[in-house]
Amino acid sequence: ATGANEDRGWFWKYIGVGYGFGNDELDCSFCETNFYKGFAMQYILLINIPITDSFDLKTSYHQKTSKIRHKNKSVADDYSATIINVGIGF
């Protein structure tokens, strides 16, 4: 980056990205005997928009991917989701 030290990294002050992964599992009375645990992963985009010196508008976009297989058949159910969060930070 070029310019004054204050200008360095301004983009990452307002934008964030992330990646997460782990296990996904159904929780019900018959799920443990009928379904395997699944592998889940998600991509995250965070945006921070300053409104005033004291308040920020915070938004995030999460794209979760998850498929859980049945134990007695070769089909997998898709539990993928898109999540959008909006909030105010102070």
Image (spheres, rainbow, N blue to C red):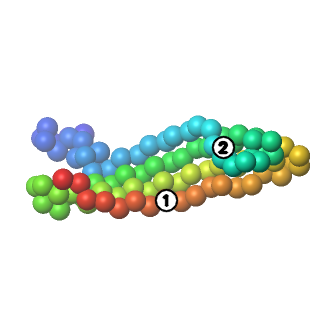
Residue highlighted by disc 2:
25
Q: What quarter of the picture does the N terminus occupy?
A: top left
Which percent across, then down, holds residue 19?
A: 49, 42
Q: In this view, does 15 lie to the left or right of 52?
A: right
- Residue at x 12% of width, y 60% of height: 52
Secondary element type, mark 1: strand
Is residue 69 among what the camera can see? no
Residue 48 vs 17, above or below: the answer is below
Of residues 59 and 34, which is closer to you in this image? 34
Residue 6 vs 57, above or below: the answer is above
Compare marks 2 and 1 and give the one earlier in the sequence: 2
Q: Nearer the viewer, mark 2 or mark 1?
A: 2
Q: Residues within 10 Å of mark 1 (few under 14, many from 20)?
A: few
Q: In this view, does 48 lie to the left or right of 5?
A: right
- Residue at x 20% of width, y 41% of height: 8
Tell me which corner region of the image, top left, top right, bottom left or bottom right, holds residue 85: bottom left
Q: Residues within 10 Å of mark 2 (few under 14, many from 20)?
A: some
Which percent across, then down, holds residue 55?
A: 17, 57
Residue highlighted by disc 1:
83
Real-space CA distance between mark 2 and mark 1, rounded to the nearest whole angstrom: 19 Å
- Residue at x 24% of width, y 42% of height: 9
- Residue at x 89% of width, y 46% of height: 72
